[in-house]
Amino acid sequence: MFAGGPLQRLPAALKLSAALVIIVGTVLLPVDWIGCLAGEGLALMLAAVVSRIPFLILIRRLAMLLPFVFGVALAGMLNPGGGLDWRIIAAKSTLCLLTVILLSHTTPLGEVIRVLQRLRVPGLLVTTMALMHRYLFVLADEAGHMRRARASRTFTRGRRFAWSALATVLSRLFIRASERAERIYDAMCARGWK
Amino acid sequence: MNPLVAAAAGCCILADQEPRKPFMHIPDGFIDAKTALVTTTLAAAGVGVALRQVRRELPPRRVPLLGLAAAFLFVAQMVNFPVAGGTSGHLIGGALVAVLLGPSAAVVVLTAVLIVQCLLFADGGLLALGANIFNMGLVATVSGYAVFHVVRRWLPGLRGQVAAMAFAGWCSTVLAAIGCAGQLAWSGTVAWPVAFTAMTGIHLLIGVGEGAISALVLLAIARTRPDLVGVAGPMQTPLKIRAFVGYGLAVILGLGWFVAPFACSWPDGLESVAIRLGFARHAATPLLNALAPDYRIPGITSPVIATAVAAAVGVVVVFGLAVLLSRALVREPRETAGAPASPS
Amino acid sequence: MNPAVEVTSLGYCYPDGTEALCGVSFSLMPGACVGLLGPNGSGKSTLLRHLNGLLPEKPPADGNVRIHGEAITAENLPSIRRRVGLLFQNPDDQLFCPTVEEDVAFGPRQLGLSEAAVAARVQTVLVQVGLAGQDRRATHHLSQGEKRRACLAGVLACEASILALDEPTSDLDPRGRREFKALLRQIDATKVIATHDLELVVELCARSIVLDHGRVVADGATLELLGNEELMLAHGLERPHILQHVHPHHPHEAH
């Protein structure tokens, strides 16, 4: 995670609960208290600056909200009175997103998983998440290699080949993933896992 | 051009800008507290059932496979495939994973993926996690698995598997979209007719892509490593009815909860559709009376019949497409899943 | 003194029927370092997996493999696995935890040690393999050499006295190889090293066993075996150049 910043040093459980409280509060905020949203936004931006989150990342993630906001805005225009004011939704949604971004950048996933473990989230789910986190990048690299290898042997362009190349890469990725899973099972057993 | 179609196209184009986002992760702020509470409860129940099922059925050797499948799905969701006119769609993968690993394992896998996506990449809201898990982790996986096996009973062989997978992929996407629309509407964010039409409309198209990719991937796996298809769940054995009823209830309850209140308001929103299709008001009422003379639904008029017919036709068309796809991909009808061809 | 590892007429067939091992017998004294040589597919990895009970899938009642005099059975599997540390061919398969500290601590935690004891062991072992201070690093950020060392740390943390290494230097650059060899030299344990790296074998292993098609075709002093060009070529190997002249940086000691 990004080093430095006081927020990184706080315990993960605290940050997780704080994030939840902020999000619930934002969603439940009555329409008359809109001014609070501005204050909240300012506080969150300050926290983002203090935690040294790169601006570009912030902007990119906020852009992911756009399709939904756009959709709601349009729906509001087409069916006036049929839905909530899209500006309020956009504002609340942006603040909630900012909160989650802050959480994800100041709290390594490993710590979050440990918190979940302490909260008695079932072991199978926790193990799945931990293994997923560990092998995410390994599989992404493998997929990248396969794609490049496939691309260097493809001499025609066109959508049909793109689809068949994609299917080949995904199928081989799954097969490799399941073979790797067997070896990981052996490795876990070799060190005493039951 | 219908403004809603324009909205749908606009959203597709925008969605393409951030190549990593499937179009169904609801962010925070779009669903209200009561919807969040209900969906989280349903999701927790469904995932609880799935975990218990997996612990009972999954051999210990396969436990790491859940984690690796989750990593695989995450990577697969990052890839976008070209749809039409420069836009692209994304795989949800629920149906594919359900067919490969069994429904309970798939629920666990999708749940893990969604949680990590939310916490690591802020993809989908924290409060909306329950809704996202319900739509993509429960509805998509379970419906995909069910549809696959129902179709498999009619169509045998490798061709049958491919056709079933294609159709199941499409169905799972559409049903998940309906759930999503229902949640948005129940929160009061978007009026139901608009939510339903827009969400379902877009996903009718994206679902075709999902079905096609799922079918292609399943075919490739079945040809290289047929033993991996249905690896952690029963493929050849009959469905475990009891576990199935467990999920089925959660899914139906959830969908019903969100969709039912709006059933009566269909006529308003879809009036224009009915008029376009040229159904006269009066022509359909005798049909309704003939089918169910004493059944009265307040507010329902012919547009509902029109929509229902259109929906049925649409489903049959997609099913036909799925079968055609399977014929195009699998040359000999006698090719079975147990005969691996030379790997590509 | 009892042998640390004793294998008697070990045979094994894969599920599809192909024979992997046939009549393999050898024994190792504590502290010995043995090289396991052979062409690809000769059964080296399969043999190593028999040493810590990963194979056969169901341990037989009267096993062909004895560790410190004990036959491997279903009951003493945990204890065997603690004593015999297997290093897999691909370190990514073995480092299945997100951080170095978690991975090294995995073994001790499975053994049921207290958190304090686990932490102490982790620190000791990381210093031993030269990864001190790296405990918070993400495993996928490590270099190949560091990954191998982390794997070794994980196995040492269980206080293994027998190390079975499967191709430990296959993906290392020359410096990585030198450092890993130096590390192995320092560790006091019985070692079985399956490898194609003939230089490694000459430098570290006084004794070598050559496997081909699942059978032991030679077992003796490394220099004798590797110097026998006919034998080497007959079994998919070759006489290493190191035996022909003295390496300028690493003149090998007399064995």
Image (cartoon, coloured by chain):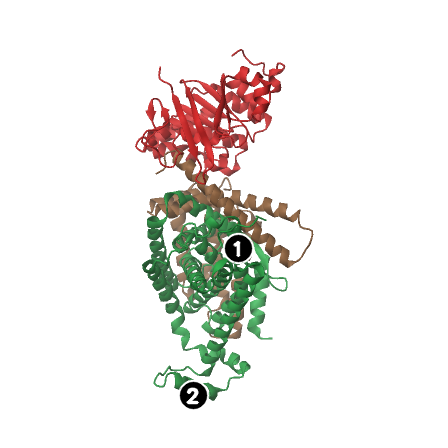
Chain colours: A brown, B green, C red
| Left or right relative to A71: residue C4 | left
- Which mark's residue is nearer the viewer, 1 or 2? 1
* Placement of the N terminus of chain B among the 4 image quadrants: bottom right
In the rendering, which numbered label is found on residue B286? 2
- Answer whether residue B23 is visible to the viewer in this image: no
At mark 2, the secondary structure is helix
Marks 1/2 in contact by CB < 8 Å: the verdict is: no
Q: How far apart are marks 1 and 2 (CA)?
A: 47 Å
Give the residue furthest to the top.
Answer: C254
- Residue identified by numbered label 1: B219
Q: Position of residue C205 (x, y in %)?
A: 50, 18
The kind of residue on which mark 1 rests is Leu
- Mark positioned earlier in the residue sequence (1 or 2): 1
Q: Residue at x 54, y 70 (%)?
A: A74
Q: Which residue is drawn at 42% across and 19% down?
A: C28
Q: Image quadrant of residue C2? A: top left
B110 in relation to B199, above or below: above
Q: Where is residue B135 in the image (x, y as percent from the top left)?
A: 43, 61
The kind of residue on which mark 2 rests is Pro
Q: Image quadrant of residue B148? A: bottom left
| Left or right relative to B65: residue C40 | right
C21 in relation to A124, above or below: above
- Answer whether residue C177 is visible to the viewer in this image: yes
- Front-most of residues C147 and C62: C62
Q: Position of residue C253 (x, y in %)?
A: 54, 12
At mark 1, the secondary structure is helix
